[in-house]
Amino acid sequence: MLNKFLVITAVSLMSLIIVSCDRDSASEAKKVTKKKETEIVQNNSKRWYTSSQSMRGRQVFKDNCATCHGDKGQGLAEDWRKPLANDTYPAPPLNGTAHTWHHSKEALLRTINNGGIPLGGTMPQFKDSLTDKQKEEVLAYVMSLWPNNIYMAWKERNPS
């Protein structure tokens, strides 16, 4: 009877170990697959800027743009497409949920330089208050807020 108990216990432990190892292998395989999928997405969406540029741009954005565009570029107006009482438009979101991604880098830099007044907004011009490097870094930060699918759509529109 004792031998039968020991055999059953040993078989049960072996089964548990095998199932556990199999579960660990499956879990590891899922991790590897997920990592490869992430690498593919990242490789397919290589961005024109570095993470350092984006991080520096975050501070410039915070100091110069967040008051109107929101601290994460989410916009502050209920509807950025609707003119305000003074017939100007509110600052749009820059996080990929509005039209910013429709524009080339050159057009976005032109808006930073000349402001939004010529376009019906109230954004001041930053031509003389930000360096060219800071403007590029702000764009890097703004584009870092865009999900990969939005960035890829922008990249398709702006291949150069």
Image: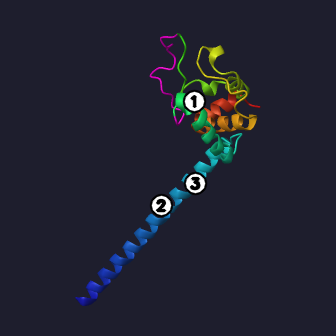
Q: Position of residue 26 (x, y in %)?
A: 48, 61
The amino acid type, in three-letter code, at marker 2 is Ser
Mark 1 — residue? 94
The amino acid type, in three-letter code, at marker 3 is Lys
Local secondary structure at mark 1 = loop
Quadrant assignment, res 130: top right
Residue 8 vertical position relative to residue 65 in the rendered view, above or below = below
Residue 116 left/right relative to 79: right
Local secondary structure at mark 2 = helix
Residue 15 vertical position relative to residue 7 in the rendered view, above or below = above
Residue placed at 33% from the left, 76% from the top? 12
Could you tell which of marks 2 and 1 lies nearer the N-terminus? 2
Mark 2 — residue? 27
Q: Position of residue 118 (x, y in %)?
A: 66, 14
Residue 110 vertical position relative to residue 36 in the rendered view, above or below = above
- Residue 35: mark: 3
Marks 3 and 2, how far apart at CA: 12 Å
Residue 47 lies in the magenta-colored region: no
Magenta-tinted stretch: 71-86
Residue placed at 66% from the left, 47% from the top? 51
